[in-house]
Amino acid sequence: MAKSKQLMNQYFSLKDIRKTFSMLKPFFQRHWKAYSALLFLLCFDILFTIAFAWFFGRITDAAIRGDFEELKRLIPIGIGLTVLNIIANFCDIYFETIASNGLKKDLKEYLFKHILSLPAGVASNLRSGDLLSYFTNDIHSIDGVTGSSLLNLIRLPLTYLAVLIYLFQLNWVLSMISIVIGPIAMVAGAGFGLLLKRNGRKLHSLIAQINNTLSETFQGFQVIRSFTLEKKVFEKFTRENDAYFKLELENAKLQGWYYSGGYLISSGVFLTCLSLGAYFVYQKEMSIGSLLTFTNLVGYLVYPLTGLAGQWAGFQRSITAIDRVIELVEKPVASLDLPTHIPVKRKPKSIEFQRLTFSYDENKQIFSNLSLQIPPGKMIALVGPSGAGKTTLFHLLQGVYQPQSGKILIDGIPTEEMTLSELRSTIAHVPQETFLFAGSIRENLSLAREGISEAEMIEAAKQACIHDYIMSLPQGYDSEIGERGMKLSGGQKQRIAIARAILKDAPILLLDEATSALDSNTESIVKQALAQLMRGRTTIVIAHRLSTIQNADEIIVLDEGEVIQTGTHEQLIAETGLYRKLNGTKPNQKKSLYLVSK
Ligand SMILES: Nc1ncnc2c1ncn2[C@@H]1O[C@H](COP(=O)(O)OP(=O)(O)OP(=O)(O)O)[C@@H](O)[C@H]1O
């Protein structure tokens, strides 16, 4: 009993349906005109079905009687009906595209905006393959609740009722036969619908899994090659692909059985009605025209019953797809206003961290009561062992994560009183790993802010010591740099990122110094570019190179989320403490090694 209730819930869950429609309500409302037109066309379609069957019977009887006057009257009606039907079919396709595809387009935009607005803590738990699946699979599978399946769920019962009433007037005995078959068709259809829904769920999650494998493989090509993982990755993909194929095959078999069963039932009803009808015609209880009208329409009595279950299955499959979308949309976002760059005056600003407490999750406290003051226009080097919290401090300053308590003030203004656009426009960040978008150098540099002139771009590239290299390329600034800038060397990518930061022209600069071994020539060019970038700005550098640290106005040594030392290089190297240990030097030792903070 409990099992059958559970089964019933799986097939008909009002909660799921309500959840789906309340989520889609604003999208339906936006396209209400197209949906109203579709409802009107749906009613026309039902009337047309009956009118054409009536015309069919009348013209046959008139031909048998040799009633040419009647024929002359009927032919224009037939032509009119056909023309109307052609127009209605065209409008149906047109409005269904507007309604269903328009809704999907809006939903994709909404979802994309939602993903862009997700807090970093939530976004970091999502996999790119899963995210791609929302757009490439899930949203495309929602037709059942927005398009043809939804309309058919309304169309089929209405057609059934209209045809039933009309046929009862023609011959009630024949109509009764078609009604008796109803429950059998419904039960069979419902069973298949349930199985199709179950497979639908598995198919959606398998597609997401395959997308994850593909996206990870394509992003990690280099690691796969260097660790010779090709065979392993290929086997994993083959396994998933095989499972997907098997499920599709299972689905096809189910659908095959389902349609064959439907065909068997409707053929049985059709043949029975035809044979009995022929007998009634022989008995002169029915005209040939009426029999033709009847056989023409009887399919509409059986098909809605078998078809309804099929449409219901499609509807259910779409609900499973939208279920995944709802799961994502239900993840809260602070605001759906997307930050954008706004002009900020380049005046050096002070930064203050006030009693900051932060943890990513309940497992580990990163900062507790951290306080730090950074004066305007100074260059501060942040050093400390791996995991000390240096990058986390950058995240907090940029508002990527919110502290559990405490404040961050920029020029005395708490960051929570600033909009994200204001805050992020105040800060330029050059991360350790440069990310460049596929496209030209010009496109990548133009991302820094709106309205960058050619002269500004060239000046920034010159300051970043990359202009000469760009000009040596045949296409100059229009040269394509490949996906993630793969056609450029590490040092070239870094200098483009520095030029981009120069163009952003923000008063605060966050720099995560690259540890990758640049050759000494490139390193000195990059250093020169960085010196240009830091001029007239408040700079915090997560520093790894001794030369950077030595040039800093102040060094802050961070360990396990606490500031344990501050001072200049000379002061700190003279103290016993973590800084000297990290440096691996004695106070009187002349030649220092790189700071081993990684
Ligand atoms: N998204 C995250 N979720 C959970 N924990 C995180 C996350 N990012 C970092 N951590 C943890 O926070 C701590 C501080 O990390 P952070 O990246 O700030 O250190 P770091 O000083 O920059 O280290 P490194 O020099 O190695 O880059 C680490 O223990 C790390 O495991």
Image (spheres, rainbow, N blue to C red):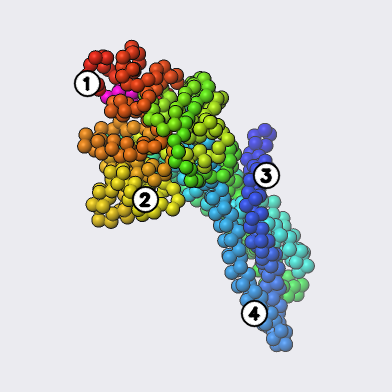
Mark 1 / mark 3, whichever is N-terminal: 3
Residue 18: mark in rendering: 3
Decide whether the magenta segment is chiefly helix, strand or loop: loop
Can you say which quadrant of the picture contains the C terminus? top left
In three-dimensional space, the C-alpha distance between marks 1 and 3, rounded to whole angstroms, equals: 72 Å
Total marks in image: 4
Task: Estimate the x, y position of residue 31 in percent, counting from the top left.
Answer: 63, 57
* Magenta stretch in the rendered image: 594-598
The three-letter code of the residue at mark 3 reads Arg
Q: Quadrant of the N terminus?
A: top right
Packing grade of label 1 (10 A; few <14, some 14-19, many >=20) is: few
Q: Which residue is mark 2?
A: 456
153 or 451, nearer to the observer:
451
Q: Residue at x 48, y 46 (%)?
A: 343
Location of residue 574 in the rendering, given as x and y in whole percent from the top left corner: 31, 14
* The quadrant where residue 233 appears: top left
Query: For residue 175, what is the image quadrant?
Result: bottom right
* Left or right for 25, reference 346: right
Say what amino acid the circle numbered 2 marks. Answer: Glu
- For marks 2 and 4, the one nearer the N-term is 4
Pointer 1 residue: 591
Q: CA distance from mark 3 to mark 4?
A: 44 Å
Q: Label 1, label 4: how many angstroms apart (C-alpha)?
A: 99 Å
**Quick check: can you spot residue 236?**
no
**Picture disc at residue 79:** 4
Q: Residues within 10 Å of mark 4 (few under 14, many from 20)?
A: few
